[in-house]
């Protein structure tokens, strides 16, 4: 494996890019080391390209048709982790579970609509929306201080 470090003053925060012809055990090991270092990132897959997704860029994470997806402003990515693993990884962050199949980033929420009895409509900064299931309404209200 080749390692290259480039110092460039135009970058305000470190950026790590791994370029390879395929995913290998060695790359996976490097990713695990980076992700366990307190820097909260996850690998997102789209068209055989692996993109490192930072928690601040993720709008929501949801499960559908047996896969887990992350929605960002730049697109949708398939994740290799299970929803509960992502919830554990981002514990203490701005992510909250709103249903059995969805986590949302509170920093990407535009508004919460409480007018629908028994549920909450969540509107995101990108224009998309989701519904909180009845089971999680009280938890969300507690987090929001309502």
Image (spheres, helix red, strand yellow):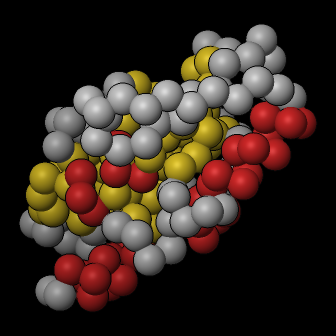
Q: Can residue 63 be seen from the camera position used here?
A: no
Residue at 26%, 30% in the rendered image: 10
Residue at 66%, 62% in the rendered image: 36
Could you say where residue 23 lies in the image, as x and y percent from the top left?
A: 80, 25
Residue at 57%, 31% in the rendered image: 5
Where 63 falls versus 98 (above or below)?
above
Is 122 in front, or is 32? 32
Q: Can residue 74 be seen from the camera position used here?
A: yes
Q: Quadrant of residue 14?
A: top left
Could you say where residue 37 lies in the image, as x and y percent from the top left?
A: 61, 63
Is 14 in front, or is 93? 14
Is 15 in front, or is 79? 15
Residue at 28%, 68% in the rendered image: 119
Where 125 falls versus 122 (above or below)?
above
What is the quadrant of the N terminus in the image?
Answer: top right
Question: Looking at this rendering, what residue extends furthest in the right direction?
Answer: 25
Answer with left or right where residue 80 lies relative to residue 25: left
Is 17 in front, or is 4? 4
Answer with left or right where residue 133 lies relative to residue 11: right
Could you say where residue 120 lies in the image, as x and y percent from the top left?
A: 24, 65
């Amino acid at each position: 494996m080749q390692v290259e470090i480039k110092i460039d003053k135009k970058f305000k925060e470190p950026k790590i890019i791994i370029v390879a012809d395929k995913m290998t055990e060695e790359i996976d090991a490097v990713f695990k080391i980076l992700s366990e270092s307190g820097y909260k990132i996850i690998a997102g897959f789209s068209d055989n390209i692996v993109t490192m997704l930072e928690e601040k860029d993720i709008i929501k994470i949801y499960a559908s048709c047996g896969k887990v997806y992350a929605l960002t402003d730049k697109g949708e990515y398939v994740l290799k982790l299970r929803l509960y693993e992502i919830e554990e990884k981002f514990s203490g962050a701005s992510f909250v579970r709103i249903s059995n199949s969805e986590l949302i980033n509170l920093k990407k929420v535009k508004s919460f609509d409480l007018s629908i009895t028994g549920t909450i409509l969540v509107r995101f900064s990108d224009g998309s929306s989701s519904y909180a299931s009845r089971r999680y309404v009280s938890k969300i209200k507690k987090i929001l201080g309502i």
